[in-house]
Amino acid sequence: MNRRTRIRLAGAAASALALVLVPTAANAAGSGGVTGAAFYVDGIQYRTVATPNNLSGTGAPTHSFDVIYDFGGAQPNVATAAPGDRDFNGGRWMVHALGFPDGYAAALAIGDADGDGVIDSDTELMTALDAGAAVDLGVVKSFTCPVIPLHG
């Protein structure tokens, strides 16, 4: 990885970390709220209820969390599981920030297998990650929140 790419990824990581660690006005006041479309799981959009909690640093085992990949605002995030999935952990989430060495458009071109204009499953995301068009920058936050499918 060249120096320019490392600098861009470091900047993306810092931006992603700032987005998930800076509390929203609702969370700062100690309350949450129902969101709009928050993330995809296997091509289906879900919303959630923002809850002001933080499980970072609790020592809980990694396998007790599902992963949400944070696209840094380029599109809704992608989670690895949802209610009804055998491996769903009940709304315990570990957020991984993503970086895009050649930009989000390059990752989209590689990962969007169904041509719908977004990376909307962990399978599509893994394609972009495996190709190096997306980079997992690591865990930036852990928390709990419910998952509610959007219909229509």
Image (cartoon, rainbow, N blue to C red):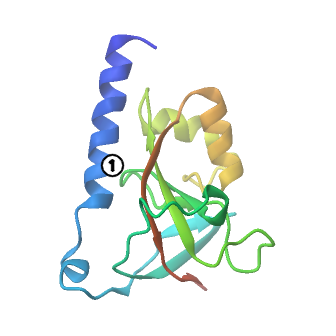
89 over 20 or under it: above or below: below
Which quadrant of the structure image shows residue 62? bottom right
Comparing 33 with 40, the one in front is: 33
Judged from this view, the residue extending furthest toward the top is 2
Q: Amino acid at mark 1?
A: Ala
Residue at position x 37%, y 51% in the image:
72
**Residue density around tag 1, few if under 14, some if 14–19, many if 20 or more, within 10 Å:** many
Residue at position x 54%, y 41% in the image:
108
Q: How many marks?
A: 1
Local SS, label 1: helix
Q: Quadrant of the C terminus?
A: bottom right
On screen, residue 127 versus residue 135, left or right, reads right
Comparing 66 with 121, the one in front is: 66
On screen, residue 104 versus residue 27, left or right, reads right
Residue at position x 36%, y 21% in the image:
6
**Residue 46 visible, this orientation:** yes
Judged from this view, the residue extending furthest toward the front is 59
**Residue 112 visible, this orientation:** no
54 over 100 or under it: above or below: below
Which residue is denoted by mark 1 in the rendering? 16
Residue 109 screen position, x and y as percent: 57, 37
Residue 7 screen position, x and y as percent: 30, 23
On screen, residue 40 versus residue 102, left or right, reads right
Judged from this view, the residue extending furthest toward the right is 86
Residue 146 screen position, x and y as percent: 53, 83
